[in-house]
Image (cartoon, rainbow, N blue to C red):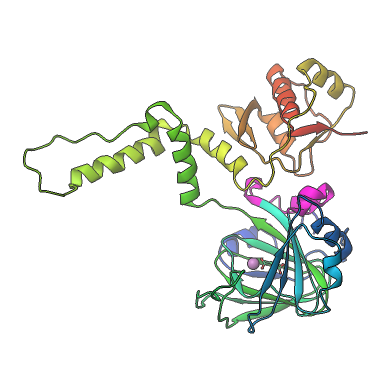
Amino acid sequence: MSAAAPLGALTVEDFLARHWQRTACHIPGAIPGFEPPLDEHDLAGLACEPDANARLVAGRYPDHDWRVRHGPFEESVFAGLGAQHWTLLVQDVEKHYPPLQSFLARFRFLPQWRLDDLMISYAVTGGSVGPHVDQYDVFLFQASGRRRWQIATTFDPALVPDCPLRVLAQFTPEQEWVLAAGDLLYLPPGIAHHGVALEPGMTWSVGLRAPSAAELLIALGEELALTPGEGGRYRDPPLAPGPRAGEITTPALQGLAALLDAELTGRVDFPDFAGRFLTRFRLAQEPEPRPAPVGTGEVERRLRSGARVARNPWTRLAWIEERGRARLYAAGARYPCSLDLAAWLCDPDGPGPLPQALADDDLAALSALLNDGHLRFRER
Ligand code: SIN
Ligand code: CO
């Protein structure tokens, strides 16, 4: 699964045209000979770190005896788990182990801002998190062992009551595959799926993120609430005497809708809002500012003498083109710069050696990104 053929025998064009956000797609041998650079012991170690987002799920379908424990865990917890029917799941693994960012880089054929995280689950035989439905697209890559995945496009959405997990009470599979090491399964949002480990092994899930209208409107509303005038206020249309008691008239409703419309399509700098919102959206951890700030002079001197920079793995970075320049956003803040600098900083393989001469505002953007903790100088 090189960058050139990230989906095995399936071309990216075919995948995007036929499957993306539409239908499930099973790709056997997507990464032949894959050797996971971490094992279940590394994953368990990570699940014990104070800032790890980890869960232990035990139970089975259809018994619905689900139990969930949230990390960080004590090491001793793993000794008492037994040989069957449990799964350890850890999110944001590529942020804790930055070399795993190269796994996400395989998905560079998708818009980068849509990628959320790499979640790794290790399941013993019979381990499962139950049949469920996700709101987001997911690529399920079998890194080791075998796991059987069953899916259904039509299903009863009723969940198991009083359950610590969102598990479907009933699940009748329509299709199933047994994924072995190196196989990949893509699932669009809204498909019921149920994975059960046939033997101990790891699934690497590349999760996508997509904001809902509610999330966008709440964020926009919170911003508007902080502006003078709160984005305008309802004013009456021409009124006639003698309104019917209690009625909200059609012109009044139109006036209310026009107020929202004016904010969304007119007054708000929507690209700026979107850039700030999307680089904050589902941000798991805010980067820490640098303790000792660097000035543009020092940044230039160090870069010219061959220093390299690395992105903070927690920072979400994205840019929007505007009149031949980039509005670059990092974790909700804006850093105007050249298109070249933005593309260089967002390279899925990480920023390489500096490719071009830097403009003054590029140096300003770089030192601000370094000082705000979104970039750091790499050790050589
Ligand atoms: C798992 O890794 O077992 C769960 C992943 C998922 O269903 O999205
Ligand atoms: Co799922």
Q: How many marks?
A: 0
Q: Position of residue 63 (x, y in %)?
A: 64, 84
**Residue 305, magenta (yes or no):** no
Quadrant containing ligand 1 reads bottom right
**Residue 96, magenta (yes or no):** yes
Drawn side of residue 112 relative to residue 313, left or right:
left
Residue 45 occupies which quadrant of the picture?
bottom right
Q: Position of residue 135 (x, y in %)?
A: 56, 61
Drawn side of residue 245 relative to residue 194, left or right:
left
Residue 121 occupies which quadrant of the picture?
bottom right
Q: Which quadrant, please, contains the N terminus? A: bottom right
| x 62%, y 32%: residue | 333
| x 70%, y 35%: residue | 343
| x 79%, y 21%: residue | 294
Asked whether residue 269 appears in the rendered view, the answer is yes
Camera-nearest residue between 74 and 328: 74
**Which residue ends up furthest to the left in the rendered image?**
242
* Vertical arrangement, residue 228 with respect to residue 121, above or below: above
In the image, the segment drawn in magenta is 92-115
Q: Position of residue 27 (x, y in %)?
A: 72, 69
Q: Position of residue 34 (x, y in %)?
A: 86, 63
Q: Which quadrant, please, contains the C terminus? A: top right
| x 57%, y 36%: residue | 276
Asked whether residue 8 appears in the rendered view, the answer is no
* Vertical arrangement, residue 204 with respect to residue 348, above or below: below
Q: Magenta residues: mostly which secondary structure?
A: helix
